[in-house]
Image (cartoon, rainbow, N blue to C red):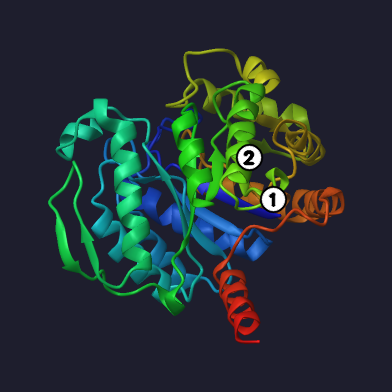
Amino acid sequence: MQFGIFSIGDVTTDPATGRTRTEHERLKAMVATAVKAEEVGFDVFATGEHHNPPFVASSPTTLLSHIAARTDRIILSTSTTLITTNDPVKIAEDYAVLQHLADGRVDLMMGRGNTGPVYPWFGKDIRQGIPLAIENYALLHQLWREEVVDWEGRFRTPLQGFTSTPRPLDGIPPFVWHGSVRSPEIAEQAAYYGDGFFVNNLFGPMNHFTKLINLYRERYAHYGHGTQEQAIVGAGGHVFVRKNSQDAIREYRPYFDNSPVYGGGPSMEQYMAQTSLTVGSPQEVIDKTLTFREYFGDYQRQLFNIDMAGLPLKTVLEQLDLLGEEVLPTLRKEMDSARPSQVPEAPTHASLLAQRTAHAEETDK
């Protein structure tokens, strides 16, 4: 089981102080969070991609390349790469460069994002969101696996004899997750390619996401990639942790109320009752996270958001210490002991390389 931290990179006024960090400070804070996440034992750090205020995470590969130089072990990922508005040729190039620089510690999550105006900014039509996601990823998948590509589609100029450079490290493309909040077409897409499927279950009732995951598992098996239990599933989550729940609730409430994604809607208690949000003690984070298996089955990756809504870096780092010391060891033990032997771990560059080597040796016999 992989555990990680993801950040959406929002620049939000701290309601406790009234101060708004600069974009420079926010980007530096994201780097510090990633470095600390590795230090305390997390497996993954992921950044979102946004091209509008109040977000600063507009260039994931630049940010992750810098983090790669500051870390040694942690997997660097995205918590959405916009497959609809980015050119798949540029995605192929940028993430291959990152993969080389990070010695393979790279995967990424494809998604359509949650900001409608981004489409015309990049010359696209939001009404074509799903067709764009399907066509662009089909091209990206081909670019990473074929040395010379001839291709023609609806949404970009044709390619003739094109080679994307650099080639993926060791000839193994970065593993891809497809993220979705509501679209069965994306679950189908993930299943078709045998890729991972990630539900960003921050804003909806948990049983809503069960339906998407069940669809993905059924179709994964249909396409012959393995059994339903062997499908690769990831989930989001949002936590604010303090030593005791009373302090956590008291401290986090103004941040929740002023959040760019939560504020003005249901109360914090309502969100905690229906979604993955946990505001409380380490034991409460453990207990809530362990219930996710009831909705998703045995899954491979759990990412937490811990830095949203103007939280100061000091508070974020304090949470990472608590999570690393008091939450991760128990979650790892419980999740690993409950996982059946036939359920695989999340793919990594090393595991995919070993799998290819084993297959080649078996073929040569």
Res 281 → quadrant: top right
Question: What amino acid is at disc 1?
Answer: Gln
Q: Badge 2: few (under 14), some or many (20 or more) residues near its Cα, within 10 Å?
A: many
Res 141 → quadrant: bottom left
The label number, if any, that marks residue 276 in the structure image: none
Please state which of residues 344 and 116 is positioned toward the viewer in this rendering.
Answer: 344
CA–CA distance in space, label 1 to label 2: 8 Å
Q: Is residue 62 visible?
A: no
Instruction: Say which quadrant the C terminus sits in.
Output: bottom right
Q: Badge 1: few (under 14), some or many (20 or more) residues near its Cα, within 10 Å?
A: some
Instruction: Give the residue displayed 52% in from the left and 20% down from the top.
Output: 257
Question: What amino acid is at disc 2?
Answer: Arg
Res 126 → quadrant: top left
Please tell me which of labels 1 and 2 falls first in the chain. Answer: 2
Q: Residue 276, percent across and down? A: 65, 30
* Number of numbered labels in the structure image: 2
Q: Residue 328, percent across and down? A: 75, 52
Instruction: Give the residue displayed 57% in from the left and 46% down from the top.
Output: 316
Q: Which residue is mark 1?
A: 230
Instruction: Give the residue displayed 50% in from the left and 22% down from the top.
Output: 262
Instruction: Give the residue displayed 75% in from the left and 27% down from the top.
Output: 246
Q: Which residue is mark 2?
A: 217
- In what element is the residue under mark 2? helix
Q: Is residue 123 visible?
A: yes
